[in-house]
Image (tube, rainbow, N blue to C red):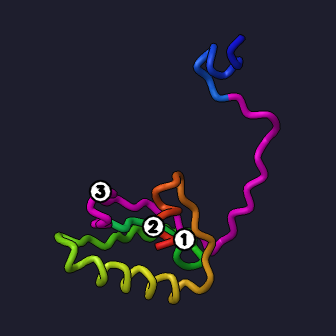
Amino acid sequence: MTALAIRENKTHVIGRPNLEIGKKSIFLDVEGYPAKNFYYLIGFCYEDGDDGSLTYQYYWADDPSQECTIWENFVATLKNIGSPTIVHYGAYEKEFLKK
């Protein structure tokens, strides 16, 4: 007998997840070439100011020689926001942050 989720090709969630996402949150998306160990895009958005407006920002590297610069810019932005919660949607961003 196969598991219900596999049989029905569905994801089952039991209960409602309790996600504590504070005001200082960054929603992160990273793109790259894993085989080349090269990240070329760091995109993110965050709430900026008391009016609830969102700021969308990205850093782009045309080639591996520019990757260090986009990392530095991203870290500088994190420092300016001050201890944000980073929200991401997959393992790729997790590996990026570990690097």
Which residue type carries mark 1?
Glu
Percent position (x, y) of residue 60?
A: 26, 70
Mark 1 Cα shell of 10 Å, populated few (<14), some (14-19), many (≥20): some
Which residues, given as a range, are shown in magenta?
12-40
Q: Nearer the viewer, residue 92 or 36?
A: 36
- Left or right of 78? Residue 25 is right
Amino acid carrying mark 3 in the image: Ala
Please state which of residues 47 and 73 is positioned toward the viewer in this rendering: 73
- 34 within the magenta span: yes
Q: Relative to 17, is 56 above or below?
A: below
| 67 part of magenta stretch | no
Which residue is denoted by mark 2 in the rendering? 96
Residue found 37% across the figure and 71% down from its top: 57
Q: Residue furthest right?
A: 15
Closer mark to the observer between disc 1 and disc 3: 3
Q: In terms of sequence position, does the residue under pointer 3 or pointer 2 come before the other?
A: 3
Query: SS for tag 1?
Result: strand
- Quadrant, the N terminus: top right
N-terminal of the pair, mark 2 or mark 1, is: 1
The x and y percentages for residue 20 are 74, 61
Q: Which residue is mark 1?
A: 47
* Residue assigned mark 3: 35
